[in-house]
């Protein structure tokens, strides 16, 4: 029988879980529950345990379960520290609790961005992923993770890799410059000062979809906007490359749709700052896992 | 009998070695040979081996030897990759060579900055060093290392932690802004534009010693100059802290004499950029090992 893992992606809106076939990443028994109602019950972790009980009862062969959570956890990966979206579970020793309730199952806890990054190694479509890489996710915030020797890099305190919070331009951290809302603010501001021809609306209603579509059609202003983003992201990547000595970068998240349009400016920065030691092995590519990245990433913790 | 290690610090000017008592860091049998004459012989590694042979013959109890080298090495720590000061040994599998010649001794190879950082843990005067810390060395260049779980952090390719080469102000990397020569350029430039009272010479001959002395006496301009340095260093430290989740920083190197005068500006940056999660455990202090840091660091690789 094929090895199967239970993957659980705890999110601020939904908790998603499912059985993942280890060799293929095939997903079955998908179950999603809204986070709010479990929070309201005052027993979030117990309700999560109930859902796990059902999954394990229906899938007797499953002996390992990986859980991704949106926040800080202890270095030994047993206890929740700071889960901003579900603060009432902060401090919960979730792994000892689950292990006691399900003694035959092994549980693995990880930050969700770290889990998603690891998922790319085991379940991504890209078959040339090396054992060391940095993943950066572009969305409302800018998240990140590093995988070193096929393991999540924890750093010193256990919560390494916060690229969204490194110093960037204008006295702001990176994600306050290139996060989704900041990107749209920048776009609307550049549009207001732009006198050339552009298909972007001038009434302050530029959307990320519209911006990507315009760039795809060669709109000069849209390309200039993404060039600004690429320059700031490129600078932060250089710092990470010099500190971690990792030269494969995956870019994921909703805004990675802009990948092709931010890449020229990123490459310009990398070529300006880095030496041949890094450039000769440097590869930047899009992450391949889509909506299921969190759940597959959680399951990949079981390897 | 006390455990003793052979420590070797390969430098561009001298190769220093000595027997280090593991518990106390007491140094004996110190020997220094100029690097140039071994280079001229065309058999650098063999001459180094001869010197090791004498040390091992004179100290029969020594079964471990640590070697620090000024450059890049392979991730498995067996082979020299890029030793800028002694390029003819690039590519040499130095550990297999020494192991074959001295089968009873175990050899450990590391980059010299990494070794010096580890030495602070085992031999530093500071008894409160945690198992995770960042070390930054200020001198002609800006070097660095991270120790995680009492181990040198190697990163992906094996040569992590190049803080001197992260992007800084004015399109320059950090060490091209605050390295010794750049610091003096900055000082002379700020002196030329300064109309206040200062004891710094206005003829372009400011020295680092003079600068530190002036700051110690409260010279406003000298303090302003170090404030500029602290601001740039502080920004780079924030990136490292966010990427590595390490909150103990040691500052070493010749220019760490300016520690007290760069600290106010560093602290200002850290308080501006970091959140309580980091600030509550943040400690920045001077490294304690002086001239013997390289040799003691090399010996500490044997632990």
Image (cartoon, coloured by chain):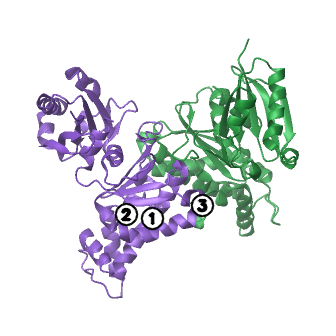
Chain colours: A green, B purple
- Of tags 2 and 3, the one toward the viewer is 3
Q: Position of residue B179 (x, y in %)?
A: 34, 61
Local crowd at mark 2 within 10 Å, few (<14), some, or many (≥20)?
Answer: many
Secondary structure of residue under mark 1? helix
Chain letter for the residue marked with disc 2 in the picture? B
Q: Position of residue A196 (x, y in %)?
A: 72, 64
Q: How much space separates mark 1 and mark 2, taking CA atoms?
A: 8 Å
Secondary structure of residue under mark 3? helix
Q: Are marks 1 and 2 in contact (CB under 8 Å)?
A: yes
Left or right: A177 as drawn, with respect to A17: left
Secondary structure of residue under mark 2? helix
Specify the label residue B232 is tagged with: 1
Residue at mark 2: B178
Left or right: A222 as drawn, with respect to B247: right
Q: Is residue A72 above or below residue A19?
A: below
Local crowd at mark 1 within 10 Å, few (<14), some, or many (≥20)?
Answer: many
First in residue order: circle 3 vs circle 1: 1
First in residue order: circle 1 vs circle 2: 2
Left or right: A85 as drawn, with respect to B295: right
Q: Looking at the rendering, in which quadrant would you find the C terminus of chain A?
A: top right
Chain letter for the residue marked with disc 1 in the picture? B
Discs 3 and 1 share one subunit: yes
Residue at mark 3: B276
Q: How much space separates mark 3 and mark 1, taking CA atoms?
A: 22 Å
Chain letter for the residue marked with disc 3 in the picture? B
Q: Position of residue A292 (x, y in %)?
A: 76, 34
Query: Quarter-wise, where is residue B122 in the image?
Result: top left
Q: How much space separates mark 2 and mark 3, taking CA atoms?
A: 28 Å
First in residue order: circle 2 vs circle 3: 2
Left or right: A53 as drawn, with respect to A71: right
């Amino acid at each position: 029988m094929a090895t199967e893992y239970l993957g659980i992606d705890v999110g601020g809106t939904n908790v998603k879980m499912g059985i993942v076939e280890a060799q293929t990443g095939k997903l079955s028994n998908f179950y999603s529950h809204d986070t709010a109602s479990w929070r309201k019950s005052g027993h979030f972790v117990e309700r999560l345990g109930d859902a796990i009980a059902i999954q394990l009862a229906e899938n007797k062969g499953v002996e390992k379960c990986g859980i991704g959570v949106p926040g800080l956890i202890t270095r030994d990966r047993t206890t929740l520290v700071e889960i901003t979206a579900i603060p009432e579970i902060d401090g919960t020793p979730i792994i000892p609790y689950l292990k006691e309730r399900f003694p035959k199952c092994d549980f693995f806890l990880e930050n969700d961005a770290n889990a998603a990054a690891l998922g790319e190694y085991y379940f991504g479509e890209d078959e040339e992923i090396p054992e060391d890489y940095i993943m950066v996710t572009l969305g409302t915030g800018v998240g990140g993770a590093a995988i070193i020797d096929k393991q999540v890099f924890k750093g010193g305190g256990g919560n390494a890799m916060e690229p969204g919070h490194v110093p960037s331009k204008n006295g702001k951290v990176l994600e306050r410059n290139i996060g989704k809302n900041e990107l749209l603010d920048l776009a609307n501001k550049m549009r207001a000062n732009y006198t050339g021809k552009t298909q972007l609306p001038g009434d302050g209603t530029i959307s990320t979809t519209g911006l990507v579509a315009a760039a795809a059609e060669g709109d000069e202003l849209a390309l200039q906007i993404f060039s600004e983003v690429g320059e700031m992201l490129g600078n932060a990547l250089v710092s990470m490359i010099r500190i971690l000595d990792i030269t494969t970068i995956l870019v994921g998240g909703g805004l990675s749709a802009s990948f092709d349009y931010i890449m020229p400016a990123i490459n310009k920065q990398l070529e300006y700052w880095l030496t041949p030691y890094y450039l000769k092995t440097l590869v930047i590519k899009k992450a391949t896992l889509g909506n299921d990245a969190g759940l597959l990433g959680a399951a990949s913790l079981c390897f």
